[in-house]
Amino acid sequence: MPPQAATSEALLAQILNSLDDDKAEDIVQIDLRGKSAIGDYMVICSGRSSRQVAAISEKLVERLKATFGISAKIEGKETGDWVLIDTGDVIVHVFRPEVREFYQLEKMWLPAEAAASRA
């Protein structure tokens, strides 16, 4: 079966499904279109432990390769505190909860009202 077309919306849907399947917590999607050239979407989520963060990230990269034939760039998997997965159109951050709280990426990208409602 040939890989699907990797539109940013198709990537986002696959990423959200994968994160949900692997029990990622507190999944937030941020629309970057028109705000940044780094990608169309950013997804931020948490895993309960370093091991789960690494496992969520590995499975996501495997599923994206199988579905779309793309090799996403992955950084930080060795420590499992904060893993960055760059698919080109969608940037995914998988954090341990304490690390996510420390960096508070959502506050940099979400509108003020949305960030305040998450606090």
Image (spheres, rainbow, N blue to C red):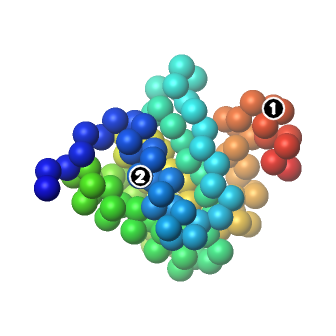
Q: Which residue is mark 1?
A: 112
Q: Residue at x 62, y 77 (%)?
A: 49
Q: Residue at x 48, y 57 (%)?
A: 17
Which disc number belongs to residue 28?
A: none
Q: Residue at x 30, y 40 (%)?
A: 6
Does residue 115 appear left or right of residue 19 in this picture? right
Does residue 58 appear left or right of residue 98 in this picture? left
Q: Earlier in the sequence, mark 2 or mark 1?
A: 2
Residue type at tag 2:
Gln
Q: Quadrant of the N terminus?
A: bottom left
Residue 16 position within the rendered picture, expressed as x and y whole percent measured from the top left: 50, 53
Q: CA distance from mark 2 to mark 1?
A: 28 Å
Residue 100 position within the rendered picture, expressed as x and y whole percent measured from the top left: 69, 58
Count of numbered marks: 2
| Residue 45 visible (yes or no) | yes
User: Which secondary structure, mark 2?
Assistant: helix
Mark 2 or 1, closer to the camera:
2
Which is nearer the eye, 55 or 66?
Answer: 66
Which disc number belongs to residue 14?
A: 2
Callout 1 environment at 10 Å: few (<14), some (14 to 19), or many (20+)?
few
